[in-house]
Amino acid sequence: MNVILRALRLLAMMVWVGGLIFFAFVEAPTAFHVMGTTRQFALVIGGSLSGLNRLGHVSGFIFLIATAMVWLRVRTSDRRLLITQIVLVVLMIAATMYVQAGILPAMERDRIAAGGDINAAPSNNPARLDFERLHPLSEKVEGSALFLGLGVVILMAAESGTRRQVES
């Protein structure tokens, strides 16, 4: 059972953090290069980000459930790393929920209000100005989720190292 729980935890983080890395460093730059900042680009990126956030929520909840089960099986002294991981994953979920429920819908409203293509709107258009305010915010919040996830990965590696040292 311990192997299954560890595998679930690893898989959940691999999927979520890997997805964030792929989105930020492969998909978004490629879509920008191929499509430019067109309406289609916005639809692809917005749809991908929504899907990635939903995948992250599922991965996060799987991670939390598996970690809670591991919590019940480890010594009290080994629980500190688990608590920190749980806190970081809860923060990741909160960040992506904020983007998904708050920022992305507002950006979509701004895009529609600007006529469908935010870049075609005049630079002083209120919808464009709001969109341009929200876009960097979404990048920062999603970026924070990525760094929190990398923190979880590092803590999981430390947890494994601690366990091996104790067993040796």
Image (spheres, helix red, strand yellow):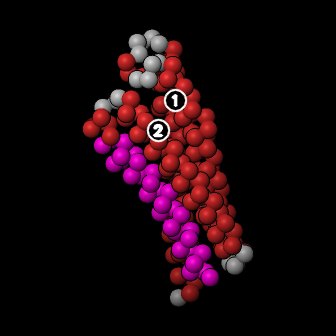
- Which secondary structure class fits the magenta region best? helix
Secondary structure beneath label 1: helix
Residue 115, image x and y in percent? 45, 19
Please tell me which residue is depicted at 41% across the width and 16% down the height of the picture: 121
Secondary structure beneath label 2: helix
Q: Quadrant of residue 69?
A: bottom right
Please tell me which residue is depicted at 53% across the width and 82% down the height of the picture: 164
| 80 and 135: which is toward the camera | 135
The magenta region covers 1-30
Q: Is 70 on the left or on the right of 8, as rendered? A: right
Q: Which residue is mark 2?
A: 46
From this view, report whether residue 89 is shown above or below residue 129. below
From this view, report whether residue 98 is shown above or below residue 17. above
Q: Residues within 10 Å of mark 1 (few under 14, many from 20)?
A: some
Q: Which residue is mark 1?
A: 108
| 145 and 158: which is toward the camera | 145
Quarter of the figure with the N terminus: bottom right
